[in-house]
Image (cartoon, rainbow, N blue to C red):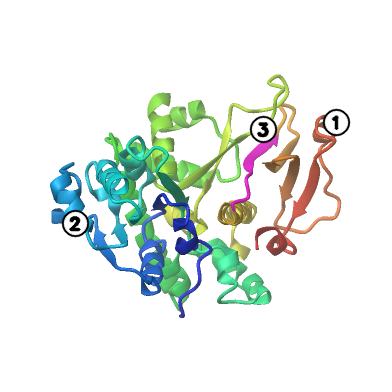
Amino acid sequence: MPYLKRLIDLKTELLSGKVLIVYGPRQVGKSTLLEHFLTQYAGEYRRDSGGNVLIQQLLSSKDFTKILPYAEGYNLIALDEAQEIPNIGDGLKILFDEMKGLQIIATGSSSFDLAQAVGEPLTGRKRAIVLYPFSQQELLGLYNRHELHEHLEDFLLFGSYPEVILAPTRSEKIKVAEELVQSYIFKDVLAMDRVRGSGQLLDLVKLLAFQVGNEVSVGKLAKEIGANAVTIKRYLDLLEKAFVIKKVGGYGANLHKEVTSKAKYYFIDTGIRNGIIGQWNDLINRNDVGALFENFVVMERIKKMAYAGDIARHYFWRTYDGQEVDLVENRPNQLTGIEIKWKARTNVHPPKAWQDRYAHAKFELITKENYLDFIA
């Protein structure tokens, strides 16, 4: 498979004149993106890995006499897995402040670790972007729109990680997806800050996987798992910062009528979700197709808008008497309610309470027949 152009252009992003931080899940293609960029880079560069003990010692030392000579003679410093380097933010700050014009790219597979490390030292000095699994827009470099639609079931079942897309058979796609689950949960999340109750965290991930598309409360999750609410909140935060899930909150201003205390949790990748519960049945033999399709559409829409720099916030909307809208997109000067239905229907209209309260809002119905226009 040829190199698929990603929608993140590192050359353009570096024009910001700031330290470029590229977050993203493990095995999502950050190193490949960086390598492809470096093959076309015209200046002198140095590329290192945060897993290198010598690099860890040097860049975490805060010693100007060691750090500055490290970058001397280079136009660009590129660091893979930068979260492995203690106090990396201080090291990057020294390079940025003392070596004017030096370009710096740092990648990391955990926004928790790397964001913690670079947050305060690089305030006002960094540009942070997220690289997701392949988006449908990016896969237009491999398929035309008709072929993308033909492969929809594969995307819903196995997701769109690069290795999964490359895998030639169904059994290999499943194997890769299950290995990614192990990497995600056991390597990244369980290695994070203060995760002691690994059994509880895994129970939480499975519970979320079975409730995709449903609103859940922290209190109910805590009760079902047998943990306190503080622990559940912390685990949810860690799972989001490790790029396992994406939180979507409730939209509304009328607290007496609109549900805003609960949230929906979507998985960054549907293959990860299915791997967590070990469910690889064909769509025809499943009862969760609607939830899978909703997860897929929401995440693809988020990818599309993030890569385009399109500012929007996403919510769900529901009233206490049961009227609901699957997704609310709040953009500057435009509010849109979006219903996501696997099976095409012609009689879907905005709920009356939505029309009454948000008469100015647009309303869209997204189905398996028209979803590509919405996400690609």
Please tell me which residue is depicted at 52% across the width and 57% down the height of the picture: 270
Using the rendered image of the protein, determine whether residue 280 is visible from the camera's viewpoint.
no
User: Earlier along the polypeptide chain: callout 3 or callout 2?
Assistant: 2
Q: Which label sits on residue 70? A: 2
Give the residue type that dot 3 points to: Tyr
Gap between marks 3 and 2 measured at Cα:
50 Å
Disc 1: CA contacts within 10 A as few (<14), some (14-19) or many (>=20): few
User: Earlier along the polypeptide chain: callout 1 or callout 3?
Assistant: 3
Q: Which residue is mark 3?
A: 251
Where is residue 346 shown, x and y percent of the image? 85, 55
Decide whether residue 350 is among the magenta residues. Answer: no
Where is residue 242 shown, x and y percent of the image? 39, 46
Gap between marks 2 and 1 measured at Cα:
63 Å
Q: Quadrant of the C terminus?
A: bottom right
Q: Which residue is mark 1?
A: 356
In the image, residue 207 sits, relative to residue 234, either above or below, namely below
In the picture, measured across the screen, residue 48 lies left or right of residue 20, that is: left
In the picture, measured across the screen, residue 354 lies left or right of residue 266, that is: right
Using the rendered image of the protein, determine whether residue 253 is visible from the camera's viewpoint.
yes
- The part of the chain drawn in magenta is 309-317
Give the residue type that dot 2 points to: Tyr
